[in-house]
Amino acid sequence: MKKQLIISIGTGRCGSVSLSKFLSAQRLTNVIHEGRIDHKKIRKLIKWDNDENELFKWLEYLISFDNSKFIGDTGMYFLPYIQKIIQKYPSVKIIVMVREKDQVVKSYLKKTEGRNHWNHHNGIGWDLDEKWDPCYPKYKLINKKEALEKYWEEYKLETESLEKKYTNNLKIWSIDDLNTNKGKNEILDFINFNLERKIDREFKHNTNLKSRKESIINKIKKWF
């Protein structure tokens, strides 16, 4: 069976979980979120810099993973490798999810309390996060909010540039498009999905509870 590789990117905190749930609800489709395959106890994250070998090992693993016709992964950290991914997989479909800057920044500030993935702080002033720190670009900005804003702005510029260059491979949608049947159909058309479609229900994923749980866990870790 010829498989369609799907990569979903975005800044994070932009509807990527909802997109994965929507796509994976379709027949013969499995688009995981940030390298997580729970029943295999797998969590594969890609570093923002210099992780090309691991990236392509992971994508090859996914392509052969199961009998899904449409297979893929979601992660903000795929952005630096997009052109190389397209070169290796010319038929790949890359979905970019976008959310307003202030909403993304606010959500990240809440989710990453005590941590700062956007600065080489070496544990000074912020907690080290060996799992997620390598997944983001770094800026020479002391103010975390300013670094997040720069991250969002640069991500937007780069994805818009890629959309112009690779019109058949990459397309940008707003998080609001997942709330409409028109938007969901457009996404499925883009990946050449030709099976029966499930678009009538909402696929929103509220991450607020998860974020609060993670915040509590991180605070408890400081005590031990």
Image (cartoon, rainbow, N blue to C red):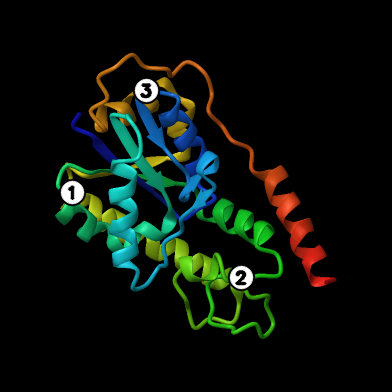
- Which is nearer the eye, 65 or 17? 65
Residue 191 higher or lower than 223, as above or below: above
Residues packed near mark 3 inside 10 Å, few (<14), some (14 to 19) or many (20 plus):
few
Which one is in front in this view, the residue at disc 1 or the one at disc 3?
Answer: 1
For the N terminus, the image quarter is top left
Please provide percent x and percent y for residue 47: 42, 67
Tell me how far mark 1 sits from mark 3, CA to CA.
28 Å
Look at 44% across and 41% down and name the residue there. 32
Label 1 residue SS: loop
- Which is nearer the eye, 130 or 189? 130
Q: Earlier in the sequence, mark 2 or mark 3?
A: 2
- Which is nearer the eye, 57 or 109? 57
Look at 37% across and 72% down and name the residue there. 49
Label 2 residue SS: loop
Going by the numbered disc 2, the residue's amino acid type is: Asp
Residue 63 shows in the view:
yes
For the C terminus, the image quarter is bottom right
Residues packed near mark 1 inside 10 Å, few (<14), some (14 to 19) or many (20 plus):
few
Left of 101 or right of it: where is 50? Answer: left
Q: Earlier in the sequence, mark 1 or mark 2?
A: 1
Q: Which residue is mark 1?
A: 89
Please provide percent x and percent y for residue 4: 24, 35
Residue 182, disc: 3
Marks 1 & 2, CB-CB < 8 Å contact: no
Residue at far right of view: 223
Residue 15 shows in the view:
no
Label 3 residue SS: helix
Going by the numbered disc 3, the residue's amino acid type is: Lys
- Which is nearer the eye, 73 or 67? 67
Q: Which residue is mark 2?
A: 129
Residue 16 higher or lower than 219, as above or below: above
